[in-house]
Image: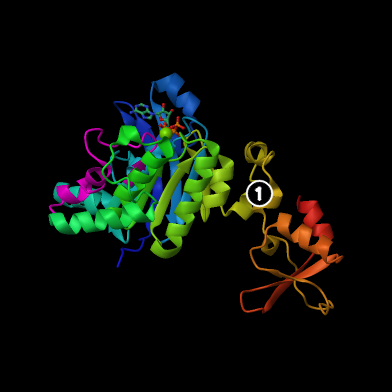
Amino acid sequence: MTNAGTPIEIRDLYKIFGPAAKAHVAAVRAGMSKEELSARHGHILGLNNINISMPAGKIQVVMGLSGSGKSTLIRHINRLIEPTSGSIMIAGRDVLSMSELDLREFRRTGTAMVFQRFALLPHRTVIDNVTFGLEVRAVDKAKSRDTAMRWIERVGLKGFENRYPTELSGGMQQRVGLARALSNDSAILLMDEAYSALDPLIRTDMQTMLLELQQELNKTIVFITHDLDEALRLGDQIVILRDGSIIQQGSSQDILLRPADDYIERFVKDVNRGRFIRVDALMESPDGRTTIGLPVLKSGTTLEVAGKELADALADAAVVADGSGRPLGVVDLRRILAAL
Ligand SMILES: Nc1ncnc2c1ncn2[C@@H]1O[C@H](COP(=O)(O)OP(=O)(O)OP(=O)(O)O)[C@@H](O)[C@H]1O
Ligand SMILES: [Mg+2]
């Protein structure tokens, strides 16, 4: 019914801003820093040797401070920005070798964007905003209204379809933006700081909705944020950028338990680890241990919940089991406390 996600492969990607960008790639490759490139040559290093394999149907988070290159990176995926060097393959297709026509088609049907400032058309109602992309694609009017209504319902806006954007709260406007993107049914969703303008509680609601929708849609979602909690909650994979370079990439567990350097350590220092680290990351082989009588924790249980369950059971270790009850490992209280 819906288009599932496609993989995105980014290889050896460099982006230098300035009139003689290509002339400086070799120097950057050889180690010239962003600062030096700017001071000596007046060029800006946007992206430096980016390699990311974004798997199909997963949420790839891109995180980093302001100016680290997040927007520059996401805009390469639908080639709103031309790379200085490197390649971008989508489902095995080279975005850089697409003709003008193919590229236009790919932008319109292969990807959809959700923006921080919603980018709704103020003189169109909710439903007319949602059908806009379909109209551009000359989809039959009745059919696009059906599709739009379906997504308006799915994002919780049924009854608001004839309202205007200014009559809606920020959270509701962002839902309209999401409905518009989803009605496009593209395999890839590009979300650049989509939730950053929302109040914290609304933001959490939007994250929950995205995770729920994703369970059934399996789009490839590239989600940019500068918020670590949001990154850890949403990201199947996370890359952290600084000055245009990748400092670390991996799962939330990798980043929390094995921060690559001091910079990442400072980033993760204040996060509530109990809420994000899962027992799976700490468990040991059950071999040679008595597991009889130990409480059982489901794979994926967070340390926060695990600690509470162990305390309730007056146990100092538990078996971690998969959905069908098969034991995967053993985790003990000492390890849990050490990780917290
Ligand atoms: N068109 C441009 N010309 C020159 N420099 C640019 C251009 N676009 C971006 N840059 C520079 O490239 C770097 C990365 O910018 P980018 O907008 O990708 O950062 P960001 O991580 O999205 O930041 P923010 O969190 O503020 O949105 C910055 O140093 C920025 O000044
Ligand atoms: Mg940005």
User: Is residue 136 in the magenta section?
Assistant: yes
| Residue pointed to by mark 1 | 256
Q: Nearer the viewer, residue 264 or 327?
A: 327
Answer left or right for 188 relative to 135. Answer: right
**Relative to 62, is 314 on the left or the right?**
right
Name the residue located 82 percent from the left edge and 80 percent from the top edge.
Answer: 292
Q: What segment is highlighted magenta in the picture?
A: 113-139
- Kindly tell me whether residue 222 is visible in this rendering: yes
User: Mark 1 vs ligand 1: CB under 8 Å?
Assistant: no
> Residue 169 in the image: x percent, y percent?
40, 36
Which one is in front, 219 or 172?
A: 172
10 Å neighbourhood of mark 1: few (<14), some, or many (≥20)?
Answer: many
Quick check: can you spot residue 257?
no
Determine whether, in the image, residue 178 is placed left or right of residue 136. right
Q: Secondary structure at mark 1?
A: helix
Does residue 190 show up magenta in the picture? no
The N terminus sits in image quarter: bottom left
Expressed as whole percent of the image width and height from the top left, the position of residue 220 reads 39, 56
Position of 235 compared to 214: left or right? right
Ligand 1 image-quadrant field: top left
**At which x and y percent is residue 240?**
53, 43
Task: Name the residue located 34 percent from the left edge and 44 percent from the top edge.
Answer: 176
Q: Amino acid at mark 1?
A: Leu
Give the x, y percent position of residue 91.
Answer: 32, 61
Q: What residue lies at 13% left-to-right and 57% top-to-bottom?
A: 140
Count of marks overlaid on the render:
1
Q: Where, by quadrant of the figure, is residue 120 drawn?
A: top left
